[in-house]
Amino acid sequence: MPEEASRILIVSHELKLLAVMRDALIQDGYNVKEFQSCDYLISGCLQFKPDLIVTEWEFPGTSALKVCEELTRNSTLHPLILAFSKRSNLEAIRVSAYSAGVDDLMPYGFSSAELSVRVYALLRRQQKTQQRPLVTMTKHLLVEVSTQRIYARTSKNKEADTELSALEFNVVYTMVSGIKNQIWTREMLLERVWGKPPEEHDLRIVDTIIARIRRKFRDKEIPDLFNTVKGSGYSFVDDIIQAERNMSLSPQDDTSRVLVDRQALTSTVA
């Protein structure tokens, strides 16, 4: 049975650019749907369920920033996001885009070849993530790769869905996959998570993403599990309990069972 083509949703108010992107991606074998604005993008995503969105960053009207932030808050949608901007050389634009959940940002005026390479690289990176252990448990977190969800035990011993974006999930999963207190430099995280060589002006993006994760954890009353290593980067300070390939917890699973499983596991390291 042939493998189903990846679904890609493209967004731009420029009809000619939409046609160029559509033709290039269809030629690459993808299933493509197009939008001319961000106004109905969320409803379009719910219907089409794209694996990846390619979107213009500066729009007349509804901003891509707001849509990306809404996508990251939606627990049923986890598309990769590739944005393009006429001002991608500005650090403020890069930081705001990555902070909103964008996985990659390219300059406006890109060629069909560059679009194809970036799309392929993002989808391949996602595929590699899905080949990792299905579930990783730490003392406070349950990380499920198949749905890109992270459940956490709060300071009040309750279960919480962290509601992280795909990019934030990959940052946490990368650090959880190491050993306790391993120091992750900003350069290491850029290479592992973004899949590109570190550039000096990109280092601040790592700090921004870690700050967003910490804020989401704090809002859910989850302990801060990330230690800032001055002059180096960050480390993950929770105890790693186990990684399983044959265990998968979906949103439809009984949450009480998850809690019982986690209590049993955490008691072994208490």
Image: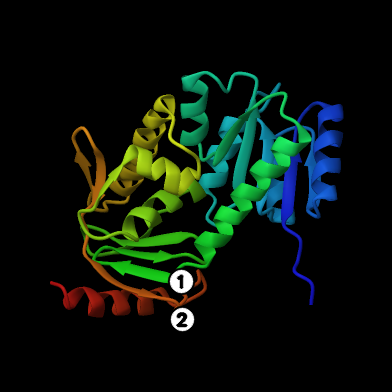
Other residues around mark 1 within 10 Å, as few (<14) / some (14–19) / many (≥20): many
Query: Residue 59: image x %, image y %?
Result: 68, 24
State whether residue 16 is above or below residue 156: above
Instruction: Using the rendered view, name the quadrant where residue 103 is placed.
Output: top right
Whether residue 147 is visible, yes or no, is no
Q: Identify the residue position indicated by label 2 in the image.
A: 246
Q: How many marks?
A: 2
Left or right: where does residue 148 sit relative to residue 255?
A: right
* In this rendering, position of residue 199 left or right of residue 140: right
Quarter that holds the C terminus? bottom left
Q: Is 39 placed left or right of 83 in the picture?
A: right
Q: Residue at x 60, y 37 (%)?
A: 67
* Callout 1: SS: loop
Q: Name the residue located 38 percent from the left edge and 36 percent from the top edge.
A: 206
In this view of the protein, can residue 228 be seen by the observer? yes
**Residue depicted at 41% across the width and 71% down the height:** 135
Q: Which residue is mark 1?
A: 134
Asked whether the beta carbons under mark 1 and mark 2 sit within 8 Å of each other, the answer is yes
Q: Earlier in the sequence, mark 1 or mark 2?
A: 1
